[in-house]
Amino acid sequence: MEKVNSLLRKTFLFLIAFYPWINYVFKKVPKLGSFWDDLLILTFFLFSVFAGYKRIKDLVILPSVLFAILFASVSILGFVFNNYLFLAFQHQFRLLFEPFFVFIAVFLINPNKDEIHFYLKSLVFSSVLLGLHGIYQYVKKVPTPAQWVDKDLERTSIYTRAFSVVGSPNVLAGYLELGLPVAFYYVFEHKDYIKKALYLVASFSILGGLLLTFSRGGWLG
């Protein structure tokens, strides 16, 4: 049973690491693209409750969880007592709390050291693919989506910004920022020089993609 649970944990952690790629594929599926990620998070959350129900008592006393409950309560009350567009509220609520539900799920499943390294290496691999794809877009001068064209940059020689499959240079920069320090960590963590070299190449691939987003917020971290 433990092997099955470990396989399920690794599967969900893999899906989290490769979310940009999986989202890109599912967004193209009719009638599924708008809610597949909600379904994934719900499935992950229910599995975590089933597999880690013994840790719920440790979860509820975490300051971050108590603060999130308070924040959610205030947000809902603020929506009820104000003339606020529901679609806008729904978007902001999801933006804030869906990642928190993933945090709760990961806390409950309590991944072991091997599973954590599996996730981190998957994140690095996903980030490398994003970075290389962004570099390819820049070299091929793929047009940046109109809504992300920077008017200030238009006056310079910069006509293309890397955006990969996420569709936004700024969002891509955010993803690459997550993978870059992990890749650098493995450069120093491994004793094998071949692995060090591989992770160093991975680090520069991610860094190259990050620089070519021309996202000032991403550069500043």
Image (cartoon, grey):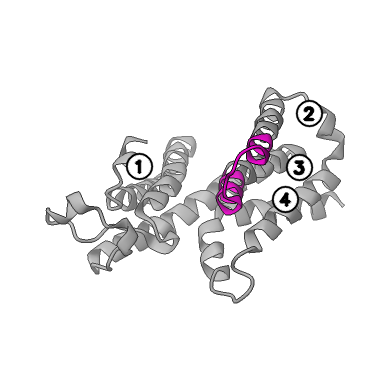
Circle nearer the N terminus (3, 4): 4
Check disc 4 and report the residue beneath it. Answer: 9
Residue range (magenta): 75-95
For discs 1 and 4, the disc positioned in front in the rendered view: 1
Left or right position of 96 against 110: left
Looking at the picture, which amino acid does disc 1 mark?
A: Gly
Tag 3 and tag 4, C-beta contact below 8 Å = yes
- Name the element at disc 2: loop
Disc 3: which residue: 109
Residue 12 appears in the picture as rendered: yes
SS type, badge 4: helix
Q: Amino acid at mark 4?
A: Arg
Residue behind mark 1: 218
Q: Position of residue 26 (x, y in %)?
A: 58, 69
Q: Main secondary structure of the magenta part?
A: helix
Residue at coordinates 27% horizontally, 67% vertically from top-left?
143
The residue carrying mark 2 is 60
Left or right of 195 on screen, residue 169? left
User: What is the three-letter code of the residue carrying label 2?
Assistant: Val
The CA distance from mark 2 to mark 1 is 34 Å
Mark nearer the N terminus (2 vs 1)? 2
The answer to which image quadrant residue 59 occupies is top right
